[in-house]
Image (spheres, rainbow, N blue to C red):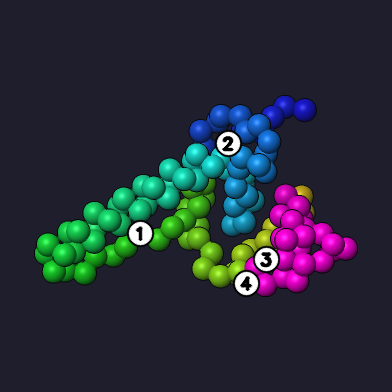
């Protein structure tokens, strides 16, 4: 089968889940490079806004971290992540099932580690 490509930079992702991040908002796999660059740009923008805020004394509106693909604001809690993934599972997204299974295996997001559910 052909290798998965990042939907943003179109570079091939060799190991799919090993070198990509699953975006629970839209169900896309995005390479870590694009995800990191998205975070770097947002952090740099907010840093500039904070500096300007100090200089002028006016309150700046910060940019929230968001999905590099669909721009949905990032989840703020494990519960919100689970709700988004459940919606993706209702849409029969196989990566959502895989993602939740790996979380059951490791027992994060408040899920109790369960080998049978994983």
Identify which residue, 84 or 48, lies in the foreground: 48
Q: Which residues are magenta?
A: 95-118
- C-alpha gap between disc 1 and disc 2: 24 Å
The residue carrying mark 1 is 63
Instruction: Pick whichever of labels 3 and 4 is earlier in the sequence.
Output: 4
SS at badge 4: helix
Q: Residues within 10 Å of mark 3 (few under 14, many from 20)?
A: few
Q: Residues within 10 Å of mark 4 (few under 14, many from 20)?
A: few
> Disc number at residue 108?
3
Marks 3 and 1: which is nearer the front?
Answer: 3
Task: Reply yes or no: does residue 115 show up in magenta.
Answer: yes
- C-alpha gap between disc 2 and disc 4: 27 Å
Image position, residue 116 (x, y; %)? 88, 63
> Disc number at residue 79?
4
- C-alpha gap between disc 3 and disc 4: 11 Å
SS at badge 1: loop
Instruction: Pick whichever of labels 1 and 2 is earlier in the sequence.
Output: 2
């Amino acid at each position: 089968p052909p290798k998965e490509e990042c939907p943003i930079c179109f570079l091939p992702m060799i190991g799919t889940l090993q070198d990509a991040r699953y975006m629970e908002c839209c169900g896309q796999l995005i390479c870590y490079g694009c995800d990191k660059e998205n975070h770097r740009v947002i952090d740099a923008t907010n840093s500039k806004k904070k500096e300007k805020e100090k200089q002028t004394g006016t309150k700046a509106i910060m940019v929230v971290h968001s999905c590099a693909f669909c721009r949905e604001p990032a989840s703020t809690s494990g519960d919100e992540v689970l709700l988004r993934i459940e919606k993706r599972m209702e849409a029969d997204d196989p990566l959502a099932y895989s993602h939740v299974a790996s979380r059951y295996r490791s027992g994060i997001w408040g899920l109790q580690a369960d080998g049978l559910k994983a």
